[in-house]
Amino acid sequence: MFENQYVDVTIPAQKNIALIAHDNKKADLVEWCKKNKTILEHHFLCGTGTTAKLVSDRTGLPVRGFNSGPLGGDQQIGARIVDGKIDIVIFFSDPLTAQPHDPDVKALLRIAQVYDIPIANNMATADFLITSPYMDSPYTRSLLNFRQNIDDRVKNM
């Protein structure tokens, strides 16, 4: 029962990085991206609507934009995590302001945890992530083998 419970998944040297920020933190994220432009320009960037456009317009970095967070952008990023297309999430959240789409944010954070994706919720953590030796090298992690888990559960029902 439950053979092959885990699989190794490698995050490549060139990362797919999602950039997200609540309204009160967008300027901070833009400044952080400017400060780290020479690192970020070697990776693929995407983000939720307004954040992606602000970062792209104000830094010159190419950022693929999804919908705004309240319009499903957080869920689009979450779906890309599930599909293995996001390797790191940089999310400058505002803990002092209620967010109307808080359930979407919690779902995004949960799925990042399930898939063992590095996620920074503030500038200090983002600084630690981006200066890590793993930033420019592959990193292998073990994830639950979801397909095998489903097959095993169905067999035992």
Image (cartoon, grey):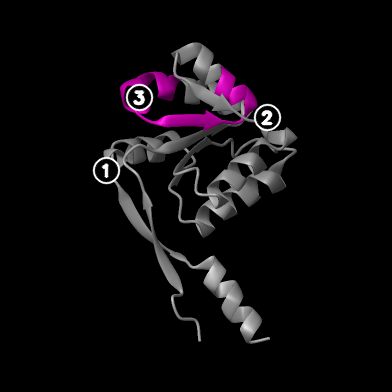
Label ID, residue 89: none
User: Which comes sooner in the sequence, label 3 or label 1?
Assistant: 3
Q: Amino acid at mark 3?
A: Asn
Q: Amino acid at mark 1?
A: Ser
Label ID, residue 68: 2
Asked whether residue 51 is drawn in magenta, I would say yes
Asked whether residue 52 is drawn in magenta, I would say yes
Task: Provide the residue span drawn in magenta.
Answer: 31-53
Q: Residue at x 43, y 31 (%)?
A: 44
Q: Residue at x 49, y 43 (%)?
A: 86
Residue that label 1 marks: 137
Q: Residues within 10 Å of mark 1 (few under 14, many from 20)?
A: few
Kindly state the secondary structure of the residue where label 1 is placed. Answer: loop
Find residue 116 and report its horizontal and vertical position in percent. 46, 56
Q: Residue at x 56, y 31 (%)?
A: 47
Residue that label 3 marks: 36
Q: Quadrant of residue 142?
A: bottom left
